[in-house]
Image (cartoon, rainbow, N blue to C red):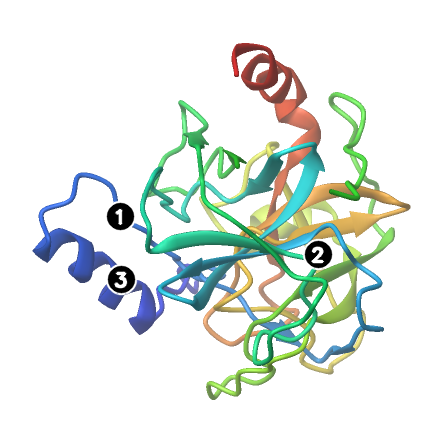
Amino acid sequence: MQPPIVTCFSIIIYLYYCSSQRTQGLLALGALGSWIIGGKEVKPHSRPYIASIQLDGRHVCGGFLVWRKWVMTAAHCVIPRHSPAVRIVLGAHSLKHQEASQQIFSIRESIMHPHFNARTVHNDIRMLEFVKRIRLPKPNTDLPPGVVCRVLGWGDTSNFGTIPTELRETQTTIVDRKICKALWVGHVNKDMLCAASLNSTLQGVCSGDSGGPLICGGRVHGIVSFSGQRCGNRRYPDIYTRISKYISWVHDVLKRF
């Protein structure tokens, strides 16, 4: 069995914040951080809801706009509030060049799900307060095996640290949860979705896209959470937080803030 991967960059971020004795850091445990494997560049600015979460100007996690001034991402991306080093960038296609469409925001609130478990990566969902949004699923909606979805991100396009500057996406297909549990012994529960490529091509997520969206039928159903050590390997399907299980918590957050 392959454990979720933790990128070297994740460890560097963690040590950086620990050494500065801050109580909150920014940890991108890549996917547990995540890359888009086997994908293609998207049409520029065709996905305006995608967010780049950055530390000192460097992309560390993905996210997506779900309400006015609210971005959803993964809880394992430990994102502090009121830090001048952290920002959300919306409206970007290229992270290499300044674009007129880009909007940059500081983070007012960073709210992790109260039952997030960093060891098991359960309840891997976080809300950021800081504008086209993407629709969320209805409460407790589950996706049957075979549904074709899309996943987007700015992460590595290979297993060797090839970092793109343009937003990319790839197709992925929902995998039966029972099969997924058998492959990921002890790691997968009903609050997660599993997806993988239908063919032998390496295709999916890996370190750098954590927090990004899994979009199925015009709604965002999942948040990139973790994957196997070999990115895009269908023997270990990519794992996503199942957003429909957290709709009531999301509504509670919006009411309180």
Of the numbered discs 1 and 3, the one sitting upstream in the chain is: 3
Q: Nearer the viewer, residue 77 or 31?
A: 77
Instruction: Specify the amino acid type for callout 3.
Output: Ile
Q: Is residue 151 above or below residue 111?
A: below
Q: Residue at x 81, y 39 (%)?
A: 143
Secondary-structure class at tag 1: loop
Q: Nearer the viewer, residue 204 or 33?
A: 33
Please rate how many residues cluster around mark 3, counting C-alpha atoms within 10 Å: few if below 14, some from 14 to 19, many from 20.
some
Residue 3: percent from the left, percent from the top?
39, 60
Q: Which residue is mark 3?
A: 13
Please rate how many residues cluster around mark 2, counting C-alpha atoms within 10 Å: few if below 14, some from 14 to 19, many from 20.
many
Q: Residue at x 31, y 46 (%)?
A: 83
Q: Which residue is most to the right? A: 217
Q: Which residue is mark 1?
A: 25
**Residues under labels 1 and 2: Cα distance?**
30 Å
Residue 131: percent from the left, percent from the top?
73, 42
Of the numbered discs 2 and 3, the one sitting upstream in the chain is: 3
Q: Nearer the viewer, residue 194 or 20?
A: 20
Q: Residue at x 55, y 18 (%)?
A: 253
Residue 168: percent from the left, percent from the top?
71, 73
Q: Which residue is mark 2?
A: 195
Q: Is residue 170 above or below residue 25?
A: below
Quadrant holding the N terminus: bottom left
Side of 35 where 150 appears, left or right: right
Side of 243 where 26 appears, left or right: left
